[in-house]
Each structure stands twice: as structure tokens, then as C-alpha cells.
Image: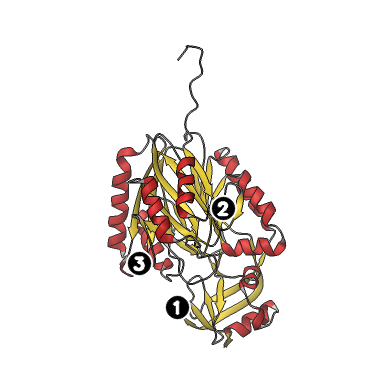
Amino acid sequence: MRPDTPPPPAAAPLCRAVSRHADPEAAVAELGEALAHPALGGVLFFCSADYPLEGLSRALRHTFGELPVVGCTTAGEISPSGYERGCIVAIGFAREDFAVATALVADLDRFDLLAAQRLVDDLLERCRPDAPAGAERFALTLLDGLSSREEQVLATLEAALGRIPGFGGSAGDDNRLTRTHVYAEGRFHSQAAVVVMVATALPFEVFTTHHLRPLDHKLVVTRADSATRRVLELNALPAAEEYARLVGVPVAALDAEAFALHPLAVRIADAHYVRSVQRVNPDGSLSFYCAVETGIVLTAMHPAPMLEQLEAVLAGLAGRLGDPVLVIGCDCFLRRLELESRGDLAAASRLLARGRVIGFSTYGEQHHGMHLNQTFTGVAIGSAPSA
């Protein structure tokens, strides 16, 4: 190289990729080409549940070999262009800036504190040799979105993580509510979770936010089946009838859009945590995405303007970290339904694209051990080492 020849540009610490091919081999080949990096250290992906998952597994194993590759099925994807459906998006982590270790939790029912502590210790040990100087760590968890075990697993994992910040999302299946999957160790799994430990010297911030504001209306859960997350009675009346009366529509009109526009929340201290309704059951009960128990008080919530709130959140992250290299976002699919119903999806996509968000529409979000609904949760990663 001549003395006056500028050095080649440094490889990006994080690479983004999307493929809209329906064929799994073609889709993964396109991802592999886009994520090609001299020191690729790991891959995270989010895919439509429409893909043939066995074929997708084979293609991922063939293309990425022994690299750690994890992901999940979705209720919609967030690509470099914003909200999409029917595609697969992926993130590649460069070894120079990230140490990545992954673990599969194959049996959610037996995930106790001892198992959680062993898992976290193992992830930390595997991250340690390759961690950049001055690295800090965060954890990402992807969970089967229909397992009904999120609260127990997340609380247990949070106790083992200690001061390591954690976030994540629950896998979806394009709103079919039949079966969701996470991917690890070369194949897709149901009734399972994936935990990813990431160590980096780049500045980052784990965050969560929602645009919902409390109203004065209250609903008391007077009969519930907590094991199945079903509420049978609200205010001592059939649950679906009482909820329909609150929101002012017939029971027959209660659908995902109605639930998105009329959320409920439980208040803990000074914060409200959303408990979204999943569906109306034939017996008039309501199934929820989060844990519900007899005796809790649910507060009716009203959506504030989501676009303004989303823009403020992304601007705040950029102000604190500088323009982010990437934001890994777990965004509740009910937020997307609300944007669609209000005609704001295209504008929101432009905001997400400018904010460099990659992620997916979830059946539930996670933040510091809490299982949430109707939130936008994730990690923003800056471009310069922390001071």
C-alpha cells in the first residue's frame, strides 16, 4: 500500500440484513452474503412463522456452520425499512466489538434458581475470553410466546443475572396463536427459551417504554384461573361482558384491534404495567398474554399519540449514546395493530428506519425480569467506546 493511500474502512461492528425470499435456502443465502464479515462472531435473527422451519434450520446450519445462531418466529418483523411481514431479518456481531454466548432452556417447567445460576455462570465464563477490554454485559431472552411460563422464568433468570441488565421478547406466529418457536443449537424449539449474553465496550442502554395513560375506570378480577391466564369474572360479572361494556362495543366485536385500542394495566408502586387481552373464549372468559390472579385491580388505559412518543424515545437514545449503530427492538404486535388501525404504520416505519431499529413484533416483552405487554423494549448500541 502506498504511504498516501488511505487505509480500508473498518468493518462495521454490527451488520444488518433482510431477505424477503419465501424459499428458506435462498433467504438464508442472502443473509449470509449480507452478513459476510472477516470475524463474524454470532447471528441473531427474527423470521416469519410462514417459513418451513425444518428447511430454514438446514439452511442456517449449512450457511453459518458452528457460529452461535439464535432467533425466533414473529408476529411481524422490523427490517431496515421498518415494519414488514413474511420476511427474515438478521444481525451479525463482529468479534472485535462483541463477545456472544448463547444457551437453550429446553424445559421451562424445571428452570429453577439453581439452573438459572448455572446457566448465567456458564454464559459469563464463555464470554470472558473474547470480551473486549472494558466490556459491559447485557442479556437478551427469547421465549416461547404461548408457554404461560414467562413470569416464572424471567423472575428466576433476573435473580441470577444480578446487576446485568436484561430485556427480550416472546416469539409469535403471525397472530395465529397456535404455536411459537425459538431457535438454538441448530433447530427450532417450542416450550423453550434462548438466553444470549453479550459483552461489548461500545456504549449501550437497555430501555422500555409505552404510550399508554391511565383512566379512572377500574376492573377487579373476581375470578381467575392463573395457571391458564384466564379471567372468568370482572367486577363479579362475566369477564367478556364486563370488558365489552367498559370499552363500549358488543362482545362479538371484541378482537385484536379492540384489545390494542383498549388495554388494561396493573399498577405497581407508581408505574402501570400493561396486561393485554389475548382473546375471548367460548365460555365468556378472557385469556391474557400476562399473568392474572384473582383480586388484582386492572386500570383502563388510553393510548396517547404513539408516533410522538416513539420519536421522543429514539431521540433520547441518540442524545445519550450518539447516533446508534443499532437498536434491537422487541415491539408488541398490539402496538403494530394500533398503528395500522390509525393509518400510522408507514410513518412509524420511517421513524424506526431512521433510528436503525432491527427486531420483531412480539407476543410479550421483557425488561429487568418483568413480563410486559404493549411496550417497545430493547437495547440501543452506540458507536464509540464508553468514557
Instruction: Give how far across and how far down residue 26 sits, in percent.
Output: 48, 50
Give the foreground label among 1 and 2.
2
The residue that mark 3 highlights is 108
Near mark 1 (Cα within 10 A), the count class, few <14, some 14-19 or many ≥20, is some
The residue that mark 2 highlights is 78
Near mark 3 (Cα within 10 A), the count class, few <14, some 14-19 or many ≥20, is some
- Of labels 1 and 3, earlier in sequence is 3
- At x 50%, y 34%, the residue is 384
In terms of secondary structure, where does tag 3 sit? Answer: helix
Instruction: Give how far across and how far down residue 158 sits, in percent.
Output: 39, 58
Mark 1: which amino acid?
Answer: Thr
* Residue 207 in view here: no
Disc 2 to disc 3, C-alpha distance: 27 Å
Give the foreground label among 2 and 3.
2
In terms of secondary structure, where does tag 2 sit? Answer: strand
The residue that mark 1 highlights is 228
Work out whether residue 37 or residue 343 is closer to the camera in this orientation and state it.
Answer: 37
* Residue 258 in view here: yes
Disc 1 to disc 2, C-alpha distance: 30 Å
Work out whether residue 210 or residue 353 is closer to the camera in this orientation and state it.
Answer: 353
Mark 2: which amino acid?
Answer: Ile
